[in-house]
Amino acid sequence: MPLTARLKTWLGPRWTTRARCVLRGLPIPWWGNLRRTHPFSSYFGFERGTPVDRYYLAHFLDAHRADITGDVLEVQVGDITRRYGHQVRRSDTIDIEPQFHPTWCCDLATADTIIPDDHYDCFILPNTLSFLRDLDACLRQALRVVRPGGVVLGTTAVLGQMNGDGKDYWHLSAEGWQVVAERVWPGCNVTVRAYGNCLSATAAVMGLATEELTTAELDVMDPKFPVLVGICCRKPVA
């Protein structure tokens, strides 16, 4: 057996890796209390402060304030319309659960018999896309109810905790969502943007809160570690 192989056998994998890092000048991680198999919060960090993905959701919505106007439809409740909308004529909601008292209580995938065509200027689906089982049907319905020139705004988590309260189906990369958008919204002007970096993604997985990171740390964007993806689809005027 070669000397190198004998040394690796004698040291074992952990110390072999450490020796390799020292010899190559690579950083050695100091895990501290991050060396754990359970997160600090199992509820996305809500009890600690603001979940990390909500920081990026706010950035996405702030960038699209101009689109949240006129007649606006929002999933579940109208909080985002009230906070980010301007010159809103009508604020309606849609949800499959009657407990939220939505304007339209129905399954979005089969809303064609309930919500009229070209009825809204903006449709907001905040952190909703991953829970839509019949994804293509729901996205086609979302575009159908928007007027020509109007927009569909959607966000979805990518790296982070999955929702343990219900079915969580889709966690695609920005490129993956671009493929979906081109399939279900042909001819539309679609922009897809990823938000996050390896630190904020680690914080999101661990259930840490936005307030436990600095703004400078959160604002670094690395597409290899997307915490949240934001999608804007503008319906053609013609």
Image (tube, grey):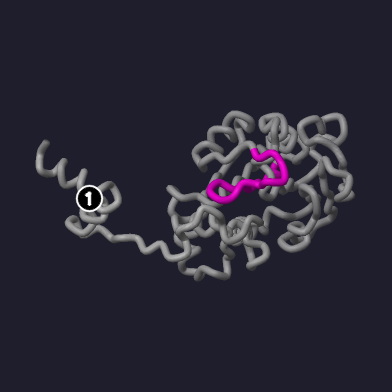
Image position, residue 145 (x, y; %): 78, 38
Q: Amino acid at mark 1?
A: Leu
Nearer to the camera, 33 or 95: 33
* Residue sitting nearer the eye, 140 or 234: 140
Q: Tell me which residue sits at (50%, 63%) in the image.
A: 218
Question: Which quadrant is home to the N terminus?
Answer: top left
Q: x, y (%) of residue 28?
A: 30, 60
Q: Is residue 5 above or below residue 213?
A: above
- Callout 1: SS: helix
Q: Is residue 51 above or below residue 160?
A: below
Question: Which residues, given as a range, are shown in magenta?
Answer: 149-168
Where residue 213 sits: x, y (%)?
A: 51, 68
User: Does residue 131 appear left or right of residue 202 in this picture?
Assistant: right
The quadrant in which residue 237 appears is top right
Identify the residue position indicated by label 1 in the image: 11
Residue at (54%, 39%) from the top-left corner?
172
Q: Quadrant of residue 52?
A: bottom right
Residue 67 lies, in percent from the top left, at 68, 53
Residue at 56% x, 48% y is 229
